[in-house]
Image (tube, rainbow, N blue to C red):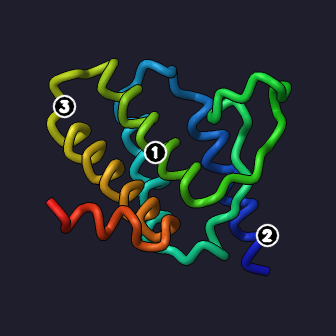
Amino acid sequence: MIKTEYQKKDKEIRLFLSNFSADFCCVWKLLGEALAMFHHFPNQVTNIEIPAELLDDQDNSKGDKIKADKRQLLSLASKCFVRALKIQPDNVSCWQDLAISYHYQLVEFEKSKSGDLFKLRYYF
C-alpha cells in the first residue's frame, strides 16, 4: 500500500516538474535537497529507481530507470546543486547545501572504507 502511494506521488511530482523550464534554480535546488535527505535513511531503504537521464548514463534511452544506491543519490544531489549554481551563482543557500552534500558523501565514504580514512583524518 505504501509503495503505491509513493508511485502516485512520483507521478504527480514528475507532472509538476515537467511544466517547468530547466532554467529554474529553485527546481534544481529542491531536487538536490530531496536527494540529500536520503543521507538520514539506512542503506536498505535508499535503493530507489531514478530516471537514467539524471545520472548522465549514455547507455540508456530516454524513459529508462536505474536503481541508485545512497552514494549515487548523494552524488546526484551535488550535481543538482551545481546545476542550480550555474543558473544563479550568487545563491548562498545553494553553496551551503552543496557543502553539506559533499560532507554527507564524505561520511558515507568513511563508513564504506572501514575506518581507514577516519584514522588518516585524525593523524594530521
Is the residue 26 above or below the residue 109 in the image? above
Looking at the picture, which amino acid does disc 3 mark?
Asn
Residue 91: image tag = 3
Between discs 1 and 3, the one toward the N terminus? 1
Q: Which mark is residue 4?
A: 2
Q: Sequence order check: which comes first, mark 1 or mark 2?
A: 2
Which of the two residues, 105 or 53, is positioned nearer the viewer here? 105
Disc 3/disc 2 C-alpha distance (Å): 36 Å
SS type, badge 1: helix
Residue at left 39%, top 51%? 33
Q: Are marks 1 and 3 in contact (CB under 8 Å)?
A: no
Front position in the image: 109 or 28 = 109
Which amino acid, mark 2? Thr
Residue visible at 34% across and 48% down in the picture: 102
Q: Picture coordinates of residue 98 (x, y %)?
A: 30, 42
- The quadrant of the rendering that contains the N terminus is bottom right
